[in-house]
Amino acid sequence: MKEPLGSPREVGEGYKYVSLGLTFAGGIIFFMGMGFLLDRWLGWMPVLTVAGTLLGSVLSFLNVYWKLQADEKAYDAEHAAEHAAAKRRRELGEP
């Protein structure tokens, strides 16, 4: 049985992706801030801020990418039986 549109489960799925976006932004801001603080402490002003921003961007992207790949694998595993049944029906010529 399919859940109705706007069900609590769908809302929960949406929040999961909102949290990924916030994690992405938070990672960039955190590493940029750490670079800025190290720049002020060492007197290298823009070097570590830029490096921290780039490092934060790359690491945040990889984190989001890996989590989305894991979600896709879980979805495929959850729906594997449905896909197999649909393929069997197409092979037999059933609608």
Image (tube, helix red, strand yellow):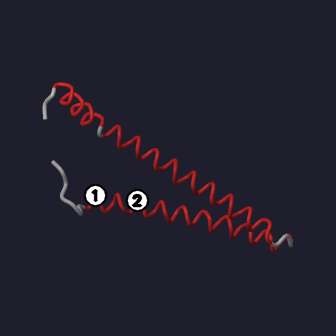
> Toward which corner of the image does residue 26 lie, by quadrant?
bottom right
Q: Amino acid at mark 1?
A: Arg
- Number of marks drawn: 2
How far across and how far down the image is residue 4, in percent?
Answer: 18, 58
Give the residue at x 38% y 42%. Answer: 74
Give the residue at x 15% y 28%. Answer: 93
**Quick check: 43 above or below 88?**
below
Q: Residue furthest top?
A: 92
Say which quadrant the C terminus sits in. Answer: top left
How far, Cα to Cα, is label 1 from label 2?
Answer: 11 Å
How far across and how far down the image is residue 86, in percent?
Answer: 22, 34
How far across and how far down the image is residue 65, in percent?
Answer: 52, 50
**For marks 1 and 2 on the same chain, the one whose residue lies earlier in the sequence:** 1
User: Mark 2 falls on what kind of element?
Assistant: helix
Q: Residue furthest right?
A: 43
User: Mark 1 falls on what kind of element?
Assistant: helix
How far across and how far down the image is residue 14, in percent?
Answer: 36, 61
Left or right of 90? Residue 72 is: right
Label 2 crowd bin: few (<14), some (14–19), many (20+), radius 10 Å: few
> Toward which corner of the image does residue 7 lie, by quadrant?
bottom left
> Toward which corner of the image does residue 85 lie, by quadrant?
top left
Mark 1 in CB contact with mark 2 (< 8 angstroms): no
Residue under circle 1? 9
Q: Residue furthest left?
A: 94
Give the residue at x 78% y 68%. Answer: 38
Q: Amino acid at mark 2?
A: Lys
Label 1 crowd bin: few (<14), some (14–19), many (20+), radius 10 Å: few
Query: Residue 16: which numbered mark, if any?
Result: 2
